[in-house]
Amino acid sequence: MAIERTNSFHLLLSDDELKLLKLLAERDGLNASDYLRTLIRNMPSTASPHATASMAARGLGGRVDLAKLFDLYGDAFKLAEASAERSKKKRAK
């Protein structure tokens, strides 16, 4: 029995975007709605914020500067290490 979905979201796409969406969905054996639903569900668990930003920039036709992307990743890593160190100090007290 199919899942009943009462919510509806309408998305305006160009002809090229719709064609690409249908091709991507077909490649995975899904229809366009199921493909988008799958992407939305998987996005938070599979991509870091930096990777998501990178994909968004490419999708908008922007160029991705890998040096800046690696710098951002390095900064995020340093912040995470500092946060972990602060947590260790708090636990030790």
Image: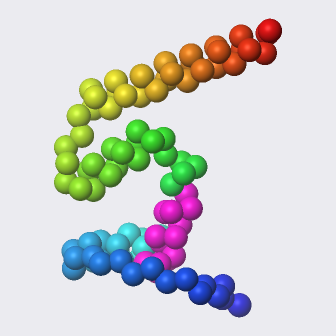
Q: Is residue 41 magenta?
A: yes
14 shown above or below 46: below
- Report x, y in % for residue 66: 27, 32
Q: Is residue 38 magenta?
A: yes
Q: What's the residue at 34%, 24% (across, down)?
A: 71
75 shown above or below 55: above
Nearer to the camera, 49 or 36: 49
48 shown above or below 17: above
The number of callouts visible is: 0
Work out which quarter of the rendered image holds the C terminus and state it.
top right
Left/right placement of residue 6 relative to residue 23 reads right
49 shown above or below 70: below
Q: What's the residue at 58%, 49% (across, down)?
A: 45
- Report x, y in % for residue 88: 72, 14
Name which quarter of the figure residue 70 lies in: top left
- Report x, y in % for residue 40: 51, 63
Q: Looking at the image, what colour scheme do you see?
A: rainbow
Q: Main secondary structure of the magenta part?
A: helix
Q: What's the residue at 56%, 62% (across, down)?
A: 41
Left/right placement of residue 79 relative to residue 74 reads right
Q: Which residues are magenta?
A: 29-42
- Report x, y in % for residue 80: 55, 24
Work out which quarter of the rendered image holds the N terminus and state it.
bottom right
